[in-house]
Image: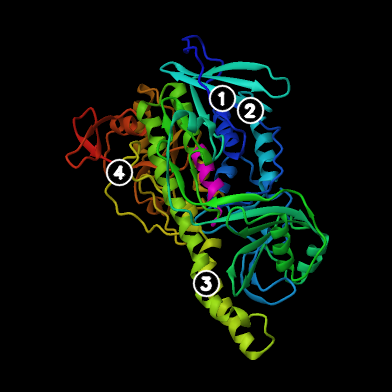
Amino acid sequence: MPRLRQTLGKEMHNYEVIIVGAGPVGTAVAIELGRRDIRCLVLEQTDGIFRDPRMHAINVRSMEVIRQWGQEGQLRDCGWPKDHPQDVTFITSLTGYELGRIEWPSIARCRPPVQSPTFAQRCPQSWFNPILHRHAATFPSVDIRWLTHAIAVEQDEHGVRVRAERLEDGRTEVFEAAYLVACDGARSEIRESLGIERDMSDVYGYSAESTFVSEELAELSKPRLAGRYTPVSEKGISASLLPHNGRDTYRMTIMADPGKVDEARMTDAIFACAGRPIAFTYTSGVLPWVNREAIAKRFRQGRIFLAGDAAHTMPPTGGFGFNTGLLDAHDLGWKLAACLQGWGGPKLLDSYEIERQEASRRTANMAGQIYKEWFAVAPLLKQKGHLLTEPSEEGESARSEVGKLLTHTFRQEFNPLGAALGYRYNNSPICVGDGSLETVDSIVEYVQTARPGHRMPHAWLDDGRSTHDLLANTLTLIDFTDEQQYIQKFDAVARTLNVPLATVALSDKRIADLFECRAAIVRPDAHVAWRSGSLEDPQDVLRIVTGNGREETSEGGQPVFVHTDGKRYQT
């Protein structure tokens, strides 16, 4: 990406934030800014119509964000049949034997886990993007420009400038803003132009996918309707078939080295999964994947931030990629707004990279763990695979043994509650550590905690609301004391510091016991920034959580923050 020759001027910016890319992550950033009346421009080089339903799983944490936006109902009504089973099945073929099934109820039968007010949703990206685009368009401060390609970016201490080309007529325009968020995908031109390298794991493997329409396959699958079909043979597990719309459209994914997958190979895989040749029509070409972890070494350079695939990519196992990117947007949006509104300090924007890079590494590592499990079952399949289609007692025994191994091995991929909710910001400079012990961090298991840096606990209140519904668009102080003593202490100081602090009086011992404190400050992204029991001075607390703490370094090299009383607090 070329750089502008001109330096940036000090004149008024056209916008406060420019977002490059109107995929789900870029649009999510725009929504977060629009909810706070921040003037932002979204530049998208396509027409906005996403024709490939690559992403399909909106996990429980992402649904909490979408619920916060008031869009949960839109996703429930996205088009996926609410009575369609979502089970994961392992088969020899759709005309052969079913080896095992991991139950996953239909949307109509799903209920939230006890740790959340909502539950995961199936919604392909070709449906999801338009829902987000429509919601973003409801905010007067959000301006989305389709068919507009950002061709040059420059920044200095005053702001950023972007030259963009209108693809319809070739005209160029120049836009200015205080900040820029690059959501331009895994091959991010902006990341490359900044010279930001990525930490990459070894390649786990390669895969390719195509989408197609087949009424014949829809009829064939009715006797064993499911949300995913995984064909198994003595060669191992090398494919999966995913219903796209619950009716007649599917996505076929196969694992194969690059250059070895073409339409003919994909067609063979579709026929093998069906168990015989079927009539179908491709709706996309063959789209390749490289399955590895790749995390940008920097998520921020000056006034430019990376989010979504521009910042991190990971194997598709677990469906973590988009969901991780959405949380980038949820983290960054309120911080940009706080700084533009004047109450966020320099450490607030610094915290984005610290928090989200750590969280991305964690999630990418979990995706890699799951990917490797696909190969852990290979020895048994090599030994027993030739028996899986045999109509004999020996064949039945092999099918039972293989089925039990498959459902046990892959259950965590399709029940990743810990992966979705358990990420935490241990090293954040804007969370006040209290010395409490960490909870378990695993793909499946999740234990609620109000330990600073963690997602706030969910519980249902007597009036039917969730604790998550108590949060404002800014910092929220929840006071569990009968006398509202923390509200009295913090409210006046917040006004003096010009910090927009929402307050909630909640004299509820059950919730206080869940939070394990007498009061807590929760960020608008539902992460606990502080809880009572450690640092108690309101001014010191508010300076830290707004990014205005004064940083020094401890003897051990860890960041500490020095406040007006001269004490040093390590996060």
Indicate which disc residue 433 carries.
Answer: 4
296 in magenta? no
- Figure label count: 4
Q: On the image, numbered disc 3 is attached to which residue?
A: 378
Q: Badge 2: how crowded within 10 Å, few (<14), some, or many (20+)?
A: some
Mark 1 → mark 3, Cα distance in angstroms: 54 Å
Q: Amino acid at mark 1?
A: Asp
- Residue occupying the point 61% across, 89% down: 394
Q: Badge 4: how crowded within 10 Å, few (<14), some, or many (20+)?
A: many
Identify whether 459 is placed above or below 25. Answer: below
Q: Earlier in the sequence, mark 1 or mark 3?
A: 1
Q: In the image, which is nearer the foreground, mark 3 or mark 4?
A: 3
Mark 2 → mark 3, Cα distance in angstroms: 52 Å
Q: Secondary structure at mark 2?
A: loop
Mark 2 → mark 4, Cα distance in angstroms: 36 Å
Looking at the figure, which quarter contains the C terminus?
Answer: top left
Indicate which disc residue 139 carries.
Answer: 2
> Which sits in the foreground, 135 or 389?
389
Q: Earlier in the sequence, mark 4 or mark 1?
A: 1
Q: On the image, numbered disc 1 is attached to which residue?
A: 37
Q: Amino acid at mark 4?
A: Gly
Q: Amino acid at mark 2?
A: Phe
Identify whether 39 is placed above or below 271. Answer: above
Given contact means CB atoms under 8 Å apart, are the residues at marks 1 and 2 in contact?
yes
Identify whether 567 is placed above or below 169. Answer: below
Q: In the image, which is nearer the foreground, mark 2 or mark 3?
A: 3
Q: Secondary structure at mark 1?
A: loop
